[in-house]
Image: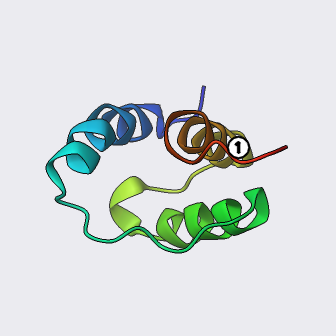
């Protein structure tokens, strides 16, 4: 597991409540897994998350797709 796993776990634990409460604003227009990956990579640049590995990025894309977007693979 990457050294950023605690940050990643915190983000994933927080995300459902942020989506439910509307705290995150309007979602970007994401129509494909490629769009979702680009958005995750954009947010991964946030230094508060630390440096995410490719495995972390793949896990985030899969989690967001499974829980919110349900895009075709």
Identify the image quadrant of residue 39: bottom right
Q: Residue furthest top?
A: 1
Badge 1 element = helix
The image's colouring method is: rainbow
Name the one closer to the observer, 51 or 11: 11
Residue at far right of view: 73
Q: Is residue 44 above or below residue 1?
A: below
Residue at the spot 39% in from the left edge and 67% down from the top edge = 47
Question: Where does label 1 land, which residue?
Answer: 58
Query: Dot 1 surroundings within 10 Å: few (below 14), some, or many (20 or more)?
Result: some
47 or 63: nearer the eye?
63
Left or right of 29, for residue 49: left
Q: Would you say 67 lies left or right of 70 here?
A: left
Image quadrant in which the C terminus is located: top right
59 in relation to 38, above or below: above
Residue nearer the viewer, 14 or 33: 33
Determine the residue positioned at 22% across, 43% down. 20
**Quarter assignment of residue 30:** bottom right
In this picture, residue 28 sits left or right of residue 41: left
Residue occupying the point 61% across, 43% down = 65
Residue 4 image offset from top left, x and y in percent: 47, 40
Q: Quadrant of the N terminus?
A: top right
Residue occupying image coordinates x 57% and y 51%:
52
Count of residue discs? 1
- The spot of residue 69 in percent (x, y) is 57, 48
Q: Is residue 29 left or right of residue 23?
A: right
Residue 49 point in image, percent of width and height: 40, 55
């Amino acid at each position: 597991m990457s050294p950023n796993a605690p940050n990643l776990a915190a983000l994933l634990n927080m995300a459902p409540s942020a989506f439910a409460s509307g705290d995150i604003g309007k979602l970007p227009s994401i129509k494909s897994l490629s769009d979702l990956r680009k958005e995750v990579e954009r947010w991964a640049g946030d230094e508060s998350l630390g440096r995410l590995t490719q495995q972390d990025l793949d896990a985030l894309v899969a989690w967001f797709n499974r829980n919110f977007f349900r895009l075709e693979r």
